Image: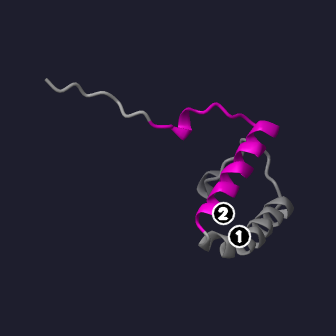
């Protein structure tokens, strides 16, 4: 009789990493492993940093709305 046992594998979703220094170290380590493991990604890193920085600046300088305001345009016109 065959018994279905789960495979012994690491599930990245089960590793408890929160915000702060531990999360930053985990993200940097994961990125380093991918960069060294997949050499093509080394060429894409500068472009990703430039695009990500541009998006971060755009979000920083965009005018913010009050939280809780309606985002449906027809609801704001009365």
Front residue (pair 54, 77): 54
Front residue (pair 16, 53): 16
Compared with 2, 24 (above or below) is: below
At horizontal 61% and vertical 51% (from top left) the residue drawn is 75
Other residues around mark 2 within 10 Å, as few (<14) / some (14–19) / many (≥20): some
At horizontal 68% and vertical 34% (from top left) the residue drawn is 17
Magenta-colored segment: predominant secondary structure: helix
* Residue 15 colored in magenta in the image: yes
Circle 2 residue = 35
Residue 52, given in percent of the width and then of the height, sits at 74, 66
* Residue 65 colored in magenta in the image: no
Compared with 30, 38 (above or below) is: below
The answer to whether the residue labelled 2 contacts the one labelled 1, judged by CB atoms less than 8 Å apart, is yes
Circle 1 residue = 45
**Which callout, 2 or 1, points at the residue further toward the start of the chain?**
2
Boundaries of the magenta span: 9-38
- Assign a secondary structure to mark 1: helix
Front residue (pair 53, 71): 53
Residue 68, given in percent of the width and then of the height, sits at 71, 41
Front residue (pair 75, 23): 23
Residue 47, given in percent of the width and then of the height, sits at 72, 75
- Relative to 1, 30 lies left or right: right
Q: Quadrant of residue 73?
A: bottom right
Whole-Å distance between the Cαs marked 2 and 1? 8 Å
Q: How many marks?
A: 2
At horizontal 71% and vertical 34% (from top left) the residue drawn is 18
Residue 57, given in percent of the width and then of the height, sits at 83, 65
At horizontal 37% and vertical 34% (from top left) the residue drawn is 7
- Assign a secondary structure to mark 2: helix
Q: Which mark is residue 5?
A: none
Compared with 13, 70 (above or below) is: below
**In what quadrant of the picture does the N terminus appear?**
top left
């Amino acid at each position: 009789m065959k018994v279905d046992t789960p495979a012994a594998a690491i599930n990245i979703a089960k590793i408890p990493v929160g915000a702060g220094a531990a999360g930053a170290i985990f993200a940097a380590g994961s990125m380093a492993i991918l960069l060294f493991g997949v050499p093509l990604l080394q060429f894409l890193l500068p472009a990703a940093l430039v695009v990500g920085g541009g998006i971060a600046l755009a979000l920083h300088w965009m005018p913010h709305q009050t939280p809780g305001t309606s985002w449906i345009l027809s609801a704001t016109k009365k």
